[in-house]
Image: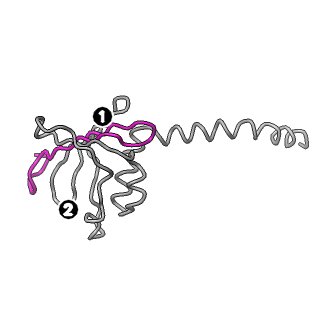
């Protein structure tokens, strides 16, 4: 028993850094970063929300392809936090490398929204947005 504990204490320091590196790498997976975006919006955590975006983010509206992507910092979500209800719920997702394509239900507005995120090194660097259906129109027949 004593040898087992001694061996465990000798091996643990060598194993822990690789385990921690795997955990931090998993936290930067594009789908995990985008999941955290929804979590921060729904709990109105402005600082945590902003930490998920690169210092400069390019944003585009898919409805008008003639407009060049605009350079911006992370959005201010404080205006969305006026009621305690959940704001966004992900309905469908496609992940392809650094790109995450989500159909969202904007709960309070009753409309579907399409968002495409490009995630690099654990930060969102580009976001494309589109409203799929007008307010009051269901995304499901």
Q: Earlier in the sequence, mark 1 or mark 2?
A: 1
Q: Residue 83 appears at what percent x and percent y? A: 27, 70
- Does 60 sit above or below residue 79? above
**Left or right, 130 with reference to 58:** left
Rendered residue at 30%/59% (across/down): 76
Q: Quadrant of residue 18?
A: top right
Rendered residue at 10%/56% (across/down): 135
Find the distance from the CA under tag 1 to the CA under tag 2: 24 Å
**Is 118 covered by the magenta stretch?**
yes
Using a 10 Å C-alpha cutoff, classify the residue at mark 1 as few (fewer than 14 neighbours), some (14 to 19) or many (20 or more): few
- Whether the residues at callouts 1 and 2 have beta carbons within 8 Å, the answer is no
The residue most toward the right is 2
**Left or right, 39 with reference to 137:** right
Q: Quadrant of residue 107?
A: bottom left
Task: Tell which of 49 and 56 is nearer to you.
Answer: 56
**Left or right, 104 with reference to 56:** left
Using a 10 Å C-alpha cutoff, classify the residue at mark 2 as few (fewer than 14 neighbours), some (14 to 19) or many (20 or more): few
Task: Look at the numbered disc 1 and give the secondary structure of its residue.
Answer: strand
**Is 105 covered by the magenta stretch?**
no
Q: How many marks?
A: 2
Q: Which residues are magenta?
A: 116-141
Task: Look at the numbered disc 2 and give the secondary structure of its residue.
Answer: loop
Q: Residue 23 appears at what percent x and percent y? A: 56, 41
Q: Which residue is mark 2?
A: 108
Rendered-image quadrant of the N terminus: top right
Q: Residue 104 appears at what percent x and percent y? A: 24, 48
**Left or right, 79 with reference to 14:** left
Q: Residue 87 appears at what percent x and percent y? A: 27, 59
Q: Which residue is mark 1?
A: 94
Rendered residue at 34%/52% (across/down): 38
């Amino acid at each position: 028993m004593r040898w087992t504990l001694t061996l465990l204490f000798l091996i643990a320091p060598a194993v822990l850094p690789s385990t921690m590196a795997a955990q931090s790498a998993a936290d930067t997976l594009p789908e995990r970063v985008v999941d955290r975006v929804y979590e921060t919006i729904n709990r109105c955590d402005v600082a945590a929300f902003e930490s998920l975006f690169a210092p400069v983010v390019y944003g585009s509206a898919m409805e008008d392809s003639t407009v060049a992507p605009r350079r911006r910092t992370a959005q201010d979500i404080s205006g969305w936090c006026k009621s305690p209800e959940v704001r966004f719920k992900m309905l469908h997702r496609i992940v392809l490398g650094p790109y995450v394509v989500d159909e969202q239900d904007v709960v309070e507005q009753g409309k579907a929204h399409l968002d495409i995120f490009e995630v690099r090194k654990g930060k969102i660097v580009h976001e494309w947005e589109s409203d799929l259906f007008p307010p009051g129109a269901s995304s499901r027949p």
